Image (spheres, grey):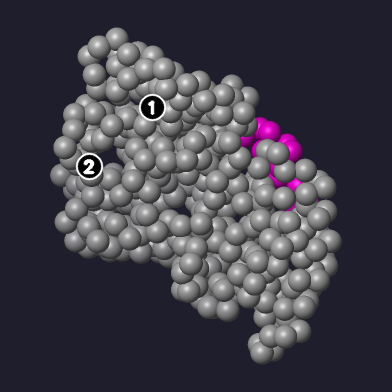
Amino acid sequence: MIYLDSAATAPLLPCVKNAVSEILEKLARAEVGNASSLYSSGVYAKELIETAREKVARFLDASPSEIIFTSGGSESNNTVLKTFENKSVAVSAIEHPSVLRPAEAYAKNLTLLPVDKTGRLDLNFLENFLEKTPAFPNLISVMLANNELGVLEPITEVKKKLQRVLKLRKNPREKCPKFHSDLTQAVGKLPLSVKQLDLDYASFSAHKIGGPLGVGVLYIKSGSPYKPLLLGGEQENSRRAGTYNLPGIVGLGVACDYCFENRTWEIYEKKVKPLRDSLAKSLLEKIPTARLNTDLENSVPNILNLSFPAAEGESIQLYLDLNGVQVSTGSACASGSLEPSHVLMAIHHDPESAHNSIRFSLSLETSPADLEKVIATLPKIVYNLQQISTIKLKEPKKCLTKK
């Protein structure tokens, strides 16, 4: 089976598998206990957790005290939005549902920040919004890399515009909004520093970088407001109740260490990006009606999103699966939904394009032979689906093709 959906879940790293297996064996022998316990096996478990916290902090360029372990990126995102309950919040229109849904549920005033046709935040709209709004929002949340398109968002430029408008307003009592970024698709693929990005909050999931499922990170800059999402326990210095997921946390630390020590972002740039770009070029040549949705010059190096007019995305996905290739039609968290992708709708405003898109997401293990299988198989699948479709094909159009 050729697996091209690492943006949903990356293959488990061998070093992570070994570390998790070792912890499970020690748990079976009662050599490690509940990290909240005071006896020796509990103290040992707590030491393992704090070692993992240090590894995550080094990976993000943060302090260990600023790291909270959660069940994943979705919980981390929900926690940030819960912190700003009944406050004014602004988020990009292409955020992950784990940001959009809690923002809708908790915010007193919610502003959706539009994006351009590449999925990049509309900085002109943002600047006008900041200049005209009576008061800055309390929180702005913009992901660093989009999970469906792979597009990189201009976080640094957003921060500069905030500072510029703040100076123009000349209100000594007004402060910049707190800033949150979902780093889930960027970790391991880009060199990251929460200090350089000047983030107040950041989140990601372990399983996107070859770590275990069901564990994630919430970074909270020291001094930033915080309201626990889960109550009823003193874990994480009373910031997140619940028994520690010891195997998951240890595996997360090992995965972060692997990425940091091996500088995986350089491997993605040198090895994976050329494969991704070659796949895009070949498919666009062999399927003239295909539409490129990923800006290849401004995206993480492993994600490619294409639309195939008159060929329904889920049908393509199922036929590829029958041919031994696994891909996605968008975010894994939205699978089973009949609604068109909100990300594709935001850039195309066209339900058909949103319904006939496919996301390929490569991993460090992806080989040229894997992609040759896709190139040999996909054109025929798309052609056959287009032949039986009731939708009339329009003239071929490539929205982001590079010369």
Q: Residue at x 77, y 78 (%)?
A: 384
Asked if residue 23 shows in the view, the reply is no
**Splitting the image into 4 quarters, where does residue 386 fall?**
bottom right
Which is the main secondary structure of the residues drawn in magenta? helix
Q: CB atoms at circles 2 and 1 under 8 Å apart?
A: no
Q: Nearer the viewer, residue 323 or 348?
A: 323
**Does the stretch in magenta take in 219?**
no
Residue 112 placement (x, y as % from top left): 35, 64
The residue located at (80%, 63%) in the rendering is 377
Locate residue 100, reporting x and y percent.
35, 59
Label 2 amino acid?
Leu
Q: Which residues are magenta?
A: 265-278
Say the numbered circle drawn on residue 393.
Answer: none
* Position of 259 relative to 46 (above/below): below
Residue bearing the label numbered 2: 230
Q: In the image, what residue occupies the spot 19% across and 61% down?
A: 108
Task: Give me the C-alpha separation between circle 2 and circle 1.
Answer: 18 Å
Crowd rating for badge 2 (residues with CA inside 10 Å; few <14, some 14–19, many 20+): some
Taking depth in this image into account, of 340 and 169 the one nearest to the observer is 340
Local secondary structure at mark 2: loop
